[in-house]
Image (cartoon, rainbow, N blue to C red):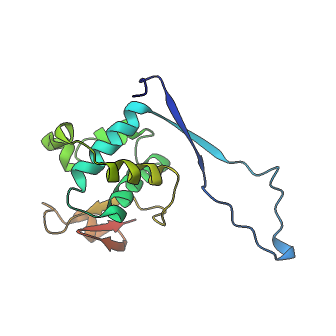
Amino acid sequence: MLSDKDTHSVNGPAAIVLTDRDDRTMDLAKAKIEQKQYTTKEIELLQKLVQAETSGEDYPGKVAVATVVLNRIESDEFPDSIHDVIMQKGQFQPVGSGVIWKSEPTDETVQAVADALVQKDNMQDIVWFMNPETATTNWIAETQEHVEQIGNHVFYR
């Protein structure tokens, strides 16, 4: 196991799409790739949240939930770290109920979080999700743009 002082760097975007059109040339030497660093504790916390939020969901649902947390870090509307996004009051039911602390991430969840960290999905700008069957309020559906449903969760921007 890595120590708490270890950090993990993720370069993004995960891919640069190049075109053969002459009018769209790019000087890759000048392209700036932003690098994010996350501590082992942050990644483990994200894995616990994803496991708690997606118990019974399939792999794409797990990646999507992890991506919501990562997208929130990039948004001006939310805190700037995995820890602070997850711990923001009233945002994630497993945090409020304490279920997150009993959650043991499966290998599938660990891989889903890893894939979300390298942006292997198409969930850009998605910062909300809910399970309409278990949600205690419907404000997200009433105020946000519906993007897609994956498993039991509906995702919004």
Q: Which quadrant does the N terminus fall into?
A: top left
Based on the displayed image, in which of its 4 quarters is residue 84 positioned? top left
Is residue 45 depicted above or below 68 in this figure?
above
Residue at the spot 34% in from the left edge and 62% down from the top edge: 59
Residue at the spot 81% in from the left edge and 62% down from the top edge: 26
On the question of residue 91 being in view, the answer is: no
Side (left or right) of 32 relative to 56: right
The percent coordinates of residue 86 (x first, y second) are: 31, 42
Side (left or right) of 60 relative to 36: left
Q: How many marks?
A: 0
Based on the displayed image, in which of its 4 quarters is residue 68 positioned? bottom left
Q: Nearer the viewer, residue 77 or 23?
A: 23
Residue at the spot 61% in from the left edge and 42% down from the top edge: 35
Is residue 107 depicted above or below 140 in this figure?
above
The percent coordinates of residue 73 (x first, y second) are: 45, 46
The residue most toward the bottom is: 21
Side (left or right) of 128 relative to 39: left
Is residue 19 depicted above or below 32 in this figure?
below
Q: Which quadrant does the C terminus fall into?
A: bottom left
On the question of residue 32 being in view, the answer is: yes
Residue at the spot 26% in from the left edge and 49% down from the top edge: 51
Side (left or right) of 105 relative to 99: right
Q: Nearer the viewer, residue 71 or 77?
A: 71
The residue most toward the right is: 22
Is residue 141 depicted above or below 32 in this figure?
below
The percent coordinates of residue 66 (x first, y second) are: 37, 52
The percent coordinates of residue 139 (x first, y second) are: 23, 64
